[in-house]
Image (tube, coloured by chain):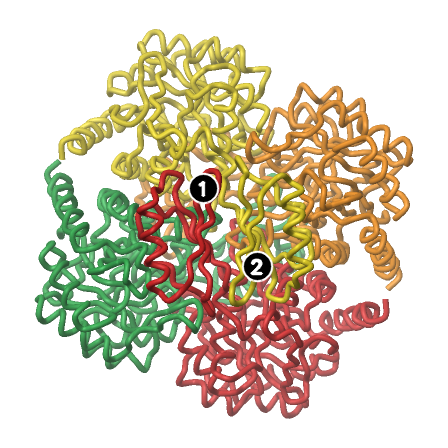
Chain colours: A green, B red, C orange, D yellow
Amino acid sequence: MLIVMHHHANQAQIDLVLAAVEAMGLKAEPIPGSLRTAIGVLGNQGYVDDSTIRTLPGVRETIHVSKPYKLVSRDFHPAATIVEVAGVRFGDGERPVMIAGPCSIETESQMLAAAEQVKTAGAQMLRGGAFKPRTGPHSFQGLGIEGLKYLQQAGQVSGLPVVTEVMRIEQLEVVCRHADMLQVGARNMQNFDLLKEVGRSGHPVLLKRGMSATLEEFLAAAEYIVAEGNNRVVLCERGIRTFEKATRNTLDLSVVPLICEMSHLPIIVDPSHATGKRALVPVMSKAALVAGAHGLMVEVHPDPAKALCDGAQSLDGGSFAGLMTELNGLIDYLKTG
Amino acid sequence: MLIVMHHHANQAQIDLVLAAVEAMGLKAEPIPGSLRTAIGVLGNQGYVDDSTIRTLPGVRETIHVSKPYKLVSRDFHPAATIVEVAGVRFGDGERPVMIAGPCSIETESQMLAAAEQVKTAGAQMLRGGAFKPRTGPHSFQGLGIEGLKYLQQAGQVSGLPVVTEVMRIEQLEVVCRHADMLQVGARNMQNFDLLKEVGRSGHPVLLKRGMSATLEEFLAAAEYIVAEGNNRVVLCERGIRTFEKATRNTLDLSVVPLICEMSHLPIIVDPSHATGKRALVPVMSKAALVAGAHGLMVEVHPDPAKALCDGAQSLDGGSFAGLMTELNGLIDYLKTG
Amino acid sequence: MLIVMHHHANQAQIDLVLAAVEAMGLKAEPIPGSLRTAIGVLGNQGYVDDSTIRTLPGVRETIHVSKPYKLVSRDFHPAATIVEVAGVRFGDGERPVMIAGPCSIETESQMLAAAEQVKTAGAQMLRGGAFKPRTGPHSFQGLGIEGLKYLQQAGQVSGLPVVTEVMRIEQLEVVCRHADMLQVGARNMQNFDLLKEVGRSGHPVLLKRGMSATLEEFLAAAEYIVAEGNNRVVLCERGIRTFEKATRNTLDLSVVPLICEMSHLPIIVDPSHATGKRALVPVMSKAALVAGAHGLMVEVHPDPAKALCDGAQSLDGGSFAGLMTELNGLIDYLKTG
Amino acid sequence: MLIVMHHHANQAQIDLVLAAVEAMGLKAEPIPGSLRTAIGVLGNQGYVDDSTIRTLPGVRETIHVSKPYKLVSRDFHPAATIVEVAGVRFGDGERPVMIAGPCSIETESQMLAAAEQVKTAGAQMLRGGAFKPRTGPHSFQGLGIEGLKYLQQAGQVSGLPVVTEVMRIEQLEVVCRHADMLQVGARNMQNFDLLKEVGRSGHPVLLKRGMSATLEEFLAAAEYIVAEGNNRVVLCERGIRTFEKATRNTLDLSVVPLICEMSHLPIIVDPSHATGKRALVPVMSKAALVAGAHGLMVEVHPDPAKALCDGAQSLDGGSFAGLMTELNGLIDYLKTG
């Protein structure tokens, strides 16, 4: 940490800061400058809570050098983590994983049809929501446990591992029983108790970025899971909230290579929620792969016009099959090109 | 809902949309314009899921007229709601309520000292966090149930009702036992299951705005609680996330009069989290009252320099007493002025 | 400046950075930490361009301590600047200045009517736009020089100094001839050539914050004007662009006390553009004064329903007179209270 | 336009709105709903100024269907526009154009070296800034006209057309004389007078998106240029300002396919300014091409470590040559794949 003193701070104020740092068991190193003095703080093993220091007279600001995460950092764990979910592998050197399926599970036949379509098209995993986070309480909230059963059945029939969102801790046990991978949604990215319990479950986790989460907060959320001994975490960029409303969210593709540099965890992209527009999904899927994503999660519905949720961003089976052909060609090109 | 067709949409496409609207049990009214046709949708009792419509050929966009909330709306419930918490009353016509106390509960003596200071200064409620949402898992996470006991005790000794955050559903019962009012934090504003359970508890709720929540989403979150039969909800503006980093968040004071116009629920302001800077708390507290806030929540710590959390935004007892004198003068002026 | 090295940076990389800093004529001070090394840069007289340094191997980030402005900083110029415009004084210790008038100048009679209304209500300055920045080219672009004449005439008849926007350098001379104060609009806050010329004119300037300008960029824009020898600059907060669309912009009132702390220049608030809603103007005007604003700029139109521009955020003469009564009461209270 | 009345609006209020719309020469069509009445406005040839209407009693909101641009819209001009700059062609069906060169022109030899490097690597156009928009006045502001001469010379020697920024109207004539294409920078995207003059010049224009400009505002800015009879406009996405600071800006790649759908003008991407990090430039360049960009603008400097401006985001000649090889392979793949 670096403590920057005010231009007009006097020696007594500087001494007080030095004493406060040492009272915290750390070493303080004054760096006198031509305009002002800065004080380097040494000896900390991680993030320093600077509340005490920032309140002292003469202090202008404190600047953190350490980050609120460590276990997920590439700095301390240079080798890439490969996350395996029932035989499907996410991570550096692996072929990008295609996850597809409807936004919400609606009926047994819808899930079976969707599973067959995505399997035939070549996807490696099946998605579907049984518990749906909706802005207002008067919208369809998902089928719940009944939906989980349809999802599991569709996964077994098609031979695809399944991923689904868990929204509350009490659902964790039943979701673990029916699904191969747990999704933590964007709205729950800082539901820290859920993160801890998901960590303790040991189950593979798909962690979506919160809609206003910085990269640092995103990695710190993953740190909560990994700190419980579960490093089977796949990150997912799904767009952030900005002033621009032409798309549902603003897909922040640059974080894909940044996360690859900063963390050893795999990162995938959800172009459906990011853009909210079906016509943009294929092109942004390809851009995501080129940006280095370890996979994609795409919404596919047998009949998007009748979808109970997010139909406007869902592909139908035929469009998805066409997209998969294009994506496979691109993946092959990127490997050899 | 209004459906706007593309400039070049043909009659067959328009007919398809009309049929789709009618298949949803609603009435469609074409509005031919000089440049394009729009179609009004009539007969819906609330928010229409437009996924089906938006996917039809020739449709450019759909525009919602209804909102995802109704119970919290002033439109349907013109009279102001007064929320009472152990004798303290929030709402139109009531004197603004001052809630004060430390960010986190640290020790028995800290809470007793804080309670005495805020009581003496004239606050009506005591706050303190036992379960702390922290960005990273390596920061202090709060004292938990032990903290709840210190808080309750400090409330009893000082005669102040207490409010504290509940972070997970399993904590709800114990928090209800120790606290007079439940706080739902910004990071949990869209933890919809928690909102439902908090609604079912019937306990008074302090609902903080999510850091990237629109006004509409904020009110829709309150709708989740009220839809469970619990209208004892006080809203709290605490700053939003923007590009500006000179303050911790950007205090969005304009929402105070807007919420007063749009909803019958009380709205208070938290200047401590909004600004993150102690020096800004007094001035923004006054601005919030002038903007029409039904109360304030201010962080006060007996010794901010030693606070385990957010010391830089906490006032000490003396500063808070001085602030209360100023605020009481201002409140009296606003009443009579 | 502080240079933070990667965890794994080796001594050769550190030495290279030290050499590069010294090649820039500055002094480098290594600060070895337990996890990584940081390097303090000393001896710079202002902002250091860190492009060279950031590109060296082993460098993780550079952190600036100095700011891109100095002349406008309170650090180097502690005494408040009072800006005088034809006898009207803006700044610490002065009564807040009320500027009022229509968004755009439409006719001679409209300006005369507006001037009389705002004068009678007690405003100290008159505003009106002759050159209007409009999002699209098909909207009303202002009356131009003819408008300037109406404005000047209305100012003379009412005895109020006038302020109006200058949009291009060629207009500067004519605007200076007709107006007592030049306004630089939000969209031109980083039109650096215009800032320089406005600085050279020596005329008083009302500089509006850009809609996505940080506080630092806002002050750096003022620095452009002051660097030309013109310190007659009044800053104006008018709302920033965020994800929230319930108001036209998000009024960032916290910058008012922050600017008072960081700069010696006066700062006023424009609640009309910030909120975009007439009903919010009175309440946010009061909040702005309480936050410490040295003045307000409010849109007033004799007949808002017929305004060619921004009618929805304009007050009529009667409402403005009522508001002035309230504001004067509040100002008196704040002075003595 | 659609006018939405309040739930409780009475018939007299509705009649008043109908009369007001008709007074504007437009046709009003009431659409009674179960909860409220809406009123469709027909007959307008473009964007309607709704200020008058929004102020009437009983009106809740007005919703625009028309846009503030028309000439640049694909709706009214379905065929793609090909912009030709001294033989280089931007647009649908053309090979993406690579523009490269230093951020700022520093010396004759630097420009000649840069031009040779980018030409050899296969770029089709040369860039370089003579007039530099810098946040603060104390940073290097560019060489001015001397720089323009170096740029032109380097273009002639290498046989590459050149593009450079024009910051003020008085520079327009000299910049047109030395450069093949005019750049309007992000900070000037809403400098409407500059847009008009650039339009009148007839010269090809590279229009960069403002850092907080919506897609609609971006297209409306282009409309200013085209409305002057100059349709030789190439748009450029260069990242937007958001809460995320891990990159310099947030590259909004989704606007590339959206603009291709909404406008007939070509759109290119500047990955250097968008990310601010050299390591991200190659990967985001490829993603941009896959997203459908009609070209790229990349910063290349013979010696980035010595660059006077933005060295951290500049590639050296060797890296750029390597990138061009990759990009050419990708372009060939995309054409045939």
Q: CA distance from mark 2 to mark 1?
A: 41 Å
User: How many neighbours does mark 2 have within 10 angstroms: few (below 14), some (14-19), or many (20 or more)?
Assistant: many
In the rendered structure, find residue D240 and report the number of the disc placed on it.
1
Q: Position of residue B261 (x, y in %)?
A: 65, 65
**Residue with the mark numbered 2:** A18
Q: Which residue: 34% across, 37% down?
A: D261
Q: Position of residue C248 (x, y in %)?
A: 60, 49
Figure quadrant of the C terminus of chain C:
bottom right
Seen from the viewer's position, the closer of residues B239 and D154 is B239
Q: Which residue: 91% across, 32% down?
A: C157
Q: Is residue A95 visible?
A: yes
Q: Position of residue D6 (x, y in %)?
A: 61, 62
Foreground disc of the pair 2, 1 = 1
User: Element at badge 2?
Assistant: helix
Chain letter behind tag 2: A
Q: Amino acid at mark 2?
A: Leu
B145 w.r.t. C175: above or below: below
Q: Amino acid at mark 1?
A: Ile
A97 w.r.t. A193: above or below: above
Seen from the viewer's position, the closer of residues D269 and A62 is D269
User: Element at badge 1?
Assistant: loop
A58 w.r.t. D130: above or below: below
Q: Position of residue B315 (x, y in %)?
A: 66, 69
